[in-house]
Amino acid sequence: MKCNNCGGNMGLEDLKCPYCGTPNPFAEKHQEDMRRFEKEFAATKEEVVTANKKRAGRNTSLILILVLILLDVGAVIFAGISSDIAYSIKEKRIQAQADQHMENILALLEEGDYCGFSAYYSANSIYYATSGTDLEDYSAVHGAAGRYRWLLQDLEKYISGNSYSFRKESMSRTCAYMAENITKLWNVEDQYSYRQEIYLAPDKLSYIQDMRERVSLLLQTYAGLTEEEAGSLGDLSQGRIQKILEERLVSTDEE
Amino acid sequence: MKNKKSREKAPLTAGRFLYRLISVVLIAVFLIAVAAGIAQIRDRLDMDDYDYYDEAYYLRTLRNEDFAGLLEMTQDDARAGKEYTGDIPECRAVARYYEAAVFFHAYEKAGEKDRAALQKQRMERFESEAGEYAYYTEKIDALFEKEP
């Protein structure tokens, strides 16, 4: 722009003409405008920054809530499958000792300690982890041994004459339970009809047969079964076996 | 510092209150679910480690002359690697004596001499292992003197 007095060049921000010193009427107005603009700019900037901060704060809150919801879903799933996790840990522990268990189990079977064999399975939770190990091959023997063990436990209680199970009021229930175990022991093959070649291999069957012979003998000796009855346990119905036991076993109240 | 102060003084609006409430509830649900899961796993694993059969339990069963119960306990107490301390081995020997006696008398009555002799040997072994509780073997023998 030109000075009104001398016509010299001067800038908008120059308060006076640099050549003649005449005051510049536009400079003051310009500076005032600039101050106003700066103020407005600062206010707008502050507004934008505040709005952005608010939006960012809201977004952060929403993200946090979302993360917490996801964590909750994960935690609830974890709680739901915690039993499976525990079983899986158990299974791994048992499988890590599978060789030792196998050795102990074979020793018990060789001794003819079928009750010990069955109890060993339970005490060491082996049934959790037989899948895929050699222990699985003994599933049918284990099934039979469980029945054999429960049956012998009842007979041993009867012999010791020291059990509530053989009092009048519980006699019938005990005989029903014994009859069920006898029937299941004699029909164990039906429960392991799949993979028979493994579960019911000759060596496994010989253990099962030995258990049956022992039970027959013990029932003859202590429950008063005749040789014929003891020899035909596999052919008798569960109800018939129960009836025979109820007839022959003497309740401890009567002794 | 200024920011902190202004934040602290920020009024608790309904939205902010709701946000805090939801956060607290979600954190509580998370902590409870995780704690329940961990407790469940620990319980399942501890269940295996828990030992029900201590010396007092063995002795109580023996003194009650519950030989069948003692044998059941002896069989069930079969955790791999467990060491039997105190008088437990003697109590277990009495239980095993009873088990052998059950079979001995059955084999003897059936005239199976070899098997009976094998059970007799076991009875003698367990009697010697029963130590100071060996007198219970006489009580066991008396059980078999009764005619069924």
Image: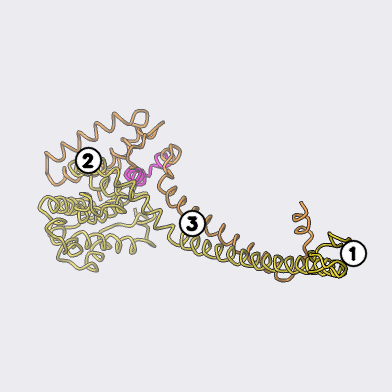
Return the residue at label 3.
B37
Secondary structure type for disc 1: loop
Confirm whether residue B17 shows in the render.
no
Residue situated in front as seen by the camera: B51 or B61? B51
Confirm whether residue B96 shows in the render.
yes
Return the residue at label 2.
A103
> Spatial distance from mark 2 to mark 1, Cα to Cα?
116 Å
Q: Quadrant of residue A150?
A: bottom left
| Majority secondary structure of magenta residues | helix
Q: Position of residue A242 (x, y in %)?
A: 26, 65
Secondary structure type for disc 3: helix
Discs 2, 1: same chain = yes
Q: In which quarter of the image is residue A231?
A: bottom left
Q: Position of residue A61 (x, y in %)?
A: 63, 65
Return the residue at label 1.
A22
The span picked out in magenta is B61-77
Q: Where is residue A125 in the image (x, y as percent from the top left)?
A: 33, 50
> Spatial distance from mark 1 to mark 3, Cα to Cα?
88 Å
Discs 1, 3: same chain = no
Q: Which chain is orange?
A: B
